[in-house]
């Protein structure tokens, strides 16, 4: 990754933040974005103090114009783009029959349309550099998770989008990676949306038992360097994807039972 220009969305916390430090440690030149300008500047200043090259750009990926400006500023600053990591995302927890439909729209706007916008505007540069287009998906993009209709839907859509982009450009040297972390210790569950659109405020999982974001970032960076097609993380995640191919009905039951054990689960 030395001297490669890497754009990371959602870089102010969790996997995105860990990816910023991981890619920087490998010699990449960074463009980091997020909605929280204060956190964005803190991370940028910390990286700059350490001697890394980084350009912070505040952007809300649900905005087409913000994404266009993010890519424009990155290309203007560095002259090229080698890796586009679509990491920005939000989650939710509510039954489909109870959730406000605006919550689902918000998740699709961020998780899916954010990937559409950034990928579309970055694509000409990535084709020129024969670079990498990366989507940080989820096991929820392989198996529908009860109580996460908007999240699973957006990740299934993201994976379909990236798969088509890969096939369309198979003769042009473009690398496309779909990375699916399992449950990762990050901030995404704390800010997940409830059925009325308010923030959940606390995680229903024991974060100490989950894969650290830094470990996830290291594995994603290695997959980018090796130009892998897909990356599925954690033993549970790999098992879920594998068994769902052959025993889908059994996995429906297992996933339901797992989610029903969460504190304050919407399942009775």
Image (cartoon, rainbow, N blue to C red):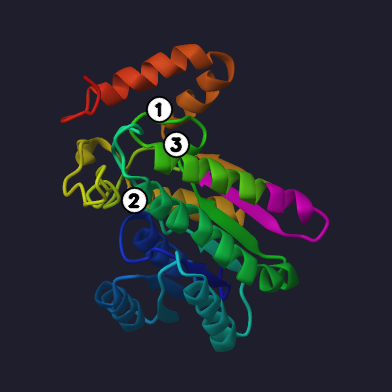
User: Mark 3 or mark 2: which is in front?
Assistant: 3
User: Mark 3 or mark 1: which is in front?
Assistant: 3
Question: What's the distance in space between the residues labelled 3 and 2, CA to CA?
Answer: 17 Å
**For the residue labelled by badge 3, is the local secondary structure a helix, a strand or a loop?**
helix
Q: Which of pointers 1 and 2 lies earlier in the amino acid sequence?
A: 2
Relative to residue 198, is residue 165 drawn left or right? Answer: right
Residue 92's place in the image compared with 243, above or below, is: below
Residue 28, can we see it? Answer: no
User: Is the C-beta separation of discs 1 and 2 under 8 Å?
Assistant: no
Asked if the stretch drawn in magenta spans residue 173, the answer is yes
Q: Residue at x 17, y 49 (%)?
A: 201
User: Is the C-beta separation of discs 3 and 2 under 8 Å?
Assistant: no
Q: Which of pointers 3 and 2 lies earlier in the amino acid sequence?
A: 3
Question: What's the distance in space between the residues labelled 3 and 1, CA to CA?
Answer: 12 Å
Residue 210, can we see it? Answer: yes
Frontmost residue, 79 versus 118: 118
Q: Disc 3 designates what residue?
A: 140
Q: Disc 1 designates what residue?
A: 236
Q: Residue at x 20, y 42 (%)?
A: 203
Which residues, given as a range, are shown in magenta? Answer: 164-180
Relative to residue 260, is residue 6 drawn left or right? Answer: right
Q: Disc 2 designates what residue?
A: 213
User: Is the C-beta separation of discs 3 and 1 under 8 Å?
Assistant: no
């Amino acid at each position: 990754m030395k001297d490669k220009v890497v754009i990371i969305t959602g870089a102010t916390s969790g996997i995105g933040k860990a990816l910023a430090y991981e890619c920087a440690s490998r010699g990449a030149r960074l463009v980091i974005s997020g909605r929280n300008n204060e956190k964005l500047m803190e991370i940028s200043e910390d990286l700059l103090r350490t001697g890394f090259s980084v350009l912070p750009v505040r952007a809300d990926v649900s905005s087409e114009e913000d994404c266009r400006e993010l890519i424009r500023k990155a290309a203007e600053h560095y002259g090229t783009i080698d890796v586009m990591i679509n990491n920005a995302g939000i989650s939710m927890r509510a039954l489909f029959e109870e959730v406000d439909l605006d919550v689902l729209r918000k998740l699709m706007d961020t998780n899916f349309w954010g990937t559409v916008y950034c990928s579309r505007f970055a694509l000409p540069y990535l084709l020129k550099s024969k670079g990498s287009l990366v989507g940080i998906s989820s096991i929820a993009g392989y198996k529908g998770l009860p109580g996460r209709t908007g999240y699973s839907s957006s990740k299934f859509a993201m994976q379909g989008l990236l798969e088509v982009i890969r096939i369309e450009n198979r003769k042009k040297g473009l690398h496309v990676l779909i990375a699916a972390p399992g449950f990762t210790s990050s901030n995404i569950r704390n800010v997940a949306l409830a059925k009325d659109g308010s923030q959940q405020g606390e995680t229903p999982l024991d974060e100490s038992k989950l894969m650290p974001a830094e470990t996830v970032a290291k594995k994603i960076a290695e997959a980018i360097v090796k130009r892998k097609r897909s990356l599925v993380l954690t033993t549970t995640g790999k098992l879920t994807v594998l068994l769902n191919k052959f025993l889908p009905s059994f996995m429906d039951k297992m996933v339901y039972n797992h989610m029903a054990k969460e504190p304050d689960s919407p399942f009775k």
